[in-house]
C-alpha cells in the first residue's frame, strides 16, 4: 500500500503526462513522422536522446527486443561494447554531465519516466519525447 501511495504522490508532484496509446502515437507522428524508427525519446536521468535507429546501430538487440525497451530503458544499458569502467550509472558518478547514455531503466524502485500511457487496461511508463530541433525540421524549399 505504501508503494501505491508513494507512486501517486510522485505522479502528482512531478506533473506527469497521462494519455492513451492512440493519443501518444498521434503525438509521435505529429512530431517525428509516421516511421516509428524516427521517433526520439529522452532519458529522464541523463538527458540522452535516442531512437529505434540508434538501438539498431549501437546495440545487439533484435527489433522485437528494441520495441520492448525503447522509451523505457536508456540505450546505455544495452551498449555492451562500452568499457564497463566508463559506464555511467544513473545514480552515481557524473550523472548526465556528458549527456549520457546511462544504465537507467524505468521498472525499478525509482520510476522516473514522465509519461503514463494507457493501452488495453494496462499502464506503461515511458520516456518523454525529445524536442525536435531546427536541423531536423523538413525543408519547405
Image (tube, rainbow, N blue to C red):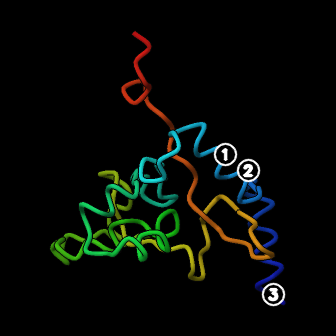
Helix, strand or loop for disc 2: helix
Q: Residue 94: x percent and y percent?
A: 33, 61
Q: Nearer the viewer, mark 3 or mark 2?
A: 2
Residue 31 image point, x, y percent: 56, 37
Q: Of discs 1 and 3, which sits in the foreground?
A: 1
Question: Depth check: 115 or 26 in front?
Answer: 26
Label 3 vs 2, first from the N-terminus = 3
Residue 3, x across and y down, in percent: 76, 85
Tell me the CA gap for discs 1 and 3: 35 Å
Q: CA distance from mark 1 to mark 2?
A: 5 Å
Total tally of numbered discs in the picture:
3
Q: Is residue 77 left or right of residue 86?
A: right
Residue count near mark 1 (Cα–Cα under 10 Å), binned few <14, some 14–19, many ≥20: few
User: Percent position (x, y) of residue 54?
Assistant: 31, 56
The residue lying at 34 percent from left, 75 percent from top is 62
Q: Which residue is mark 2?
A: 23
Task: Give the residue at x 36% y 65%.
Answer: 75
Identify the element where label 1 is drawn: helix
Badge 2: few (under 14), some or many (20 or more) residues near its Cα, within 10 Å?
A: few
Residue 26 marker: 1
Q: Residue at x 60, y 37 (%)?
A: 30
Quadrant housing residue 92:
bottom left
Along the viewing direction, whichever of 112 and 120 lies nearer the viewer: 120
Amino acid at each position: 500500500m505504501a508503494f501505491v501511495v508513494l507512486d501517486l504522490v510522485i505522479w502528482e508532484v512531478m506533473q506527469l503526462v497521462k494519455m492513451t496509446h492512440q493519443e501518444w502515437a498521434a503525438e509521435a507522428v505529429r512530431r517525428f513522422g509516421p516511421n516509428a524508427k524516427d521517433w526520439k525519446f529522452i532519458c529522464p536521468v541523463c538527458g540522452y536522446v535516442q531512437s529505434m535507429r540508434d538501438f539498431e546501430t549501437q546495440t545487439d538487440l533484435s527489433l522485437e527486443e528494441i520495441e520492448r525497451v525503447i522509451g523505457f530503458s536508456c540505450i546505455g544499458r544495452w551498449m555492451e561494447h562500452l568499457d564497463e569502467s566508463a559506464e555511467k550509472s544513473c545514480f552515481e558518478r557524473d550523472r548526465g554531465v556528458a549527456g549520457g547514455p546511462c544504465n537507467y531503466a524505468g521498472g525499478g524502485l525509482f520510476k522516473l519516466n514522465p509519461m503514463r500511457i494507457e493501452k488495453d487496461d494496462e499502464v506503461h511508463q515511458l520516456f518523454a519525447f525529445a524536442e525536435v530541433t531546427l536541423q531536423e525540421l523538413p525543408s519547405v524549399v
